[in-house]
């Protein structure tokens, strides 16, 4: 019977004097992720994190549900279901057999590895592995073979003062750093494929995100807004807490740009206004950076010249985690994290709706500054911010 889940946390163990801060954050995030389930023990000891598996009166566990949740908690590198047993050799052999049959129900190759942290145990690690391995074959048929070099499964026995722990499966986690240990940033969330992936990659490095979406009603309808809300719901699963979404009223800004600016510069000026607004919201919400889904050369507004011209209006750092990725790579991640099917729904955002036939692909900062003199930027920004709607998406 699986009693515990062993959580390995990879690079957190290399954080020196700050290691305990990162581990504490991960333990807290795990507890929050499991908060809707019955209360259980979640604790850290001797370089590992442990999560208790619960059973109902009929002997059914919540193992699969807990595993599904933990695989979406950043900072976890791998998970192993563990059987805790007593220190006598017969109990260890029984636990190893149970673990092996669960890990390789149809047969296969395996080896037994032992780590004897408690040196008072009367056998050495190699002796324990050899004895347990021999005992296993007394209960196995010819579908099972020993392989010391390239086994399909390793049965791990850990003997400590606290008890004996046996595991036989390593489940990959999300990796990265615990969300919240790297500060907060604002994600410019368009509703397309790229920006949700950028948000996911920000969270993977421990960044807590709030999303900003620019909505141009009635040019973009409620379906477009609902699509972004659905994307925030998906991201919230990885975030371990609700995602705050700021829906910025962008209609009057787009009208003014269309009326007063050359068509070829429309996207550049629009993006500069978006960055100004996002920076203002970031300052109000104590965000330290902006995250976007831009990749060099993917569209006209994502050439280096365009990025430089757009960045010029903000002082806050602009992070572009997808900057060197191909579209195919971005799509693979979107499919992996569950945002792709929502992102491809056919509801246009304000960027695609007003895309000119021949956008400027190498805009100049001086030209953009001169063009913007025709706009009342402070008034446009004030109106957009006053009409901004903030939602909490779970």
Image (cartoon, rainbow, N blue to C red):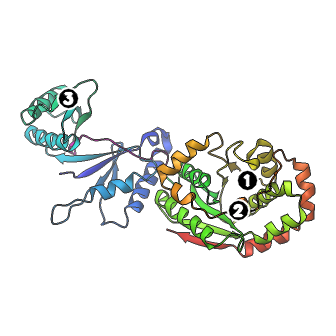
Number of the label disc, if any, that sits on residue 114: none
Q: Is residue 7 left or right of residue 113?
A: right
Question: In this picture, which residue range is highlighted in magenta?
Answer: 161-178
* Residue placed most toward the observer, 184 or 311: 311
**Dot 1: few (<14), some (14–19), or many (≥20) neighbours within 10 Å?**
some
**Helix, strand or loop under label 1:** loop
- What residue lies at 49% left-to-right and 50% top-to-bottom? 335
Can you identify the residue that label 1 sits on? 316
**Helix, strand or loop under label 3:** helix
Disc with the residue nearer the chain's start (1 vs 3)? 3
Q: Are marks 1 and 2 in contact (CB under 8 Å)?
A: yes
**Dot 3: few (<14), some (14–19), or many (≥20) neighbours within 10 Å?**
some
* Residue placed most toward the observer, 99 or 286: 99
Can you identify the residue that label 3 sits on? 125
- What residue lies at 36% left-to-right and 42% top-to-bottom? 47
Q: How many marks?
A: 3
């Amino acid at each position: 019977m699986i009693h515990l889940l062993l959580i390995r946390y990879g690079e957190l163990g290399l954080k020196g004097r700050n290691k305990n801060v990162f581990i504490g954050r991960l333990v807290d995030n795990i507890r929050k992720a499991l908060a809707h389930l019955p209360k259980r023990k979640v604790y850290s000891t001797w370089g590992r994190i442990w999560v208790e598996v619960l059973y109902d009166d009929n002997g059914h566990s919540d193992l699969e549900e807990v595993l599904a949740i933990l695989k979406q908690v950043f900072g976890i590198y791998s998970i192993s279901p563990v059987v805790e047993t007593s220190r006598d050799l017969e109990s260890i052999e029984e636990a190893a057999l149970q673990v092996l049959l669960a890990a390789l129900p149809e047969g296969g190759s395996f080896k037994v590895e032992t780590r004897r942290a408690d040196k008072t145990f009367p056998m050495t690690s190699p002796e324990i592995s050899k004895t347990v391995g021999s005992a296993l074959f007394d209960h196995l048929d010819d579908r099972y073979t020993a392989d010391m070099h390239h086994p399909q499964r390793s049965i791990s026995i850990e003997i400590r003062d606290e008890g004996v722990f046996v595991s036989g499966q390593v489940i990959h986690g999300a990796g990265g750093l615990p969300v919240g240990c790297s500060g907060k940033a604002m994600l410019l969330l368009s509703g397309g494929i790229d920006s949700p992936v950028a948000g996911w990659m920000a969270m993977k490095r421990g960044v807590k995100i709030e999303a900003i979406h620019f909505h141009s009603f009635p040019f973009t309808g409620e379906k477009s807004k609902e699509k972004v809300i659905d994307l925030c719901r998906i991201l919230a699963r990885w975030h371990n807490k609700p995602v705050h979404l700021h829906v910025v009223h962008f209609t009057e800004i787009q009208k003014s740009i269309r009326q007063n600016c050359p068509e070829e510069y429309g996207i550049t000026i629009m993006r500069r206004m978006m960055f100004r607004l996002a920076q203002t919201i970031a300052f109000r919400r104590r965000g330290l950076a902006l995250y976007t889904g831009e990749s060099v050369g993917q569209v006209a507004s994502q050439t280096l010249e365009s990025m430089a011209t757009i960045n010029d209006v903000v002082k806050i750092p602009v992070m572009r985690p997808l900057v060197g990725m191909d579209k195919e790579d971005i799509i693979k991640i979107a499919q992996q994290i569950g945002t792709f099917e929502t992102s491809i729904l056919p509801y246009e955002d304000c960027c695609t709706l007003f895309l000119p036939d021949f956008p400027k692909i190498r805009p100049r900062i001086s030209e953009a500054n001169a063009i913007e003199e025709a706009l009342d930027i402070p008034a446009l920004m004030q109106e957009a911010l006053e009409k901004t709607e903030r939602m909490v998406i779970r």
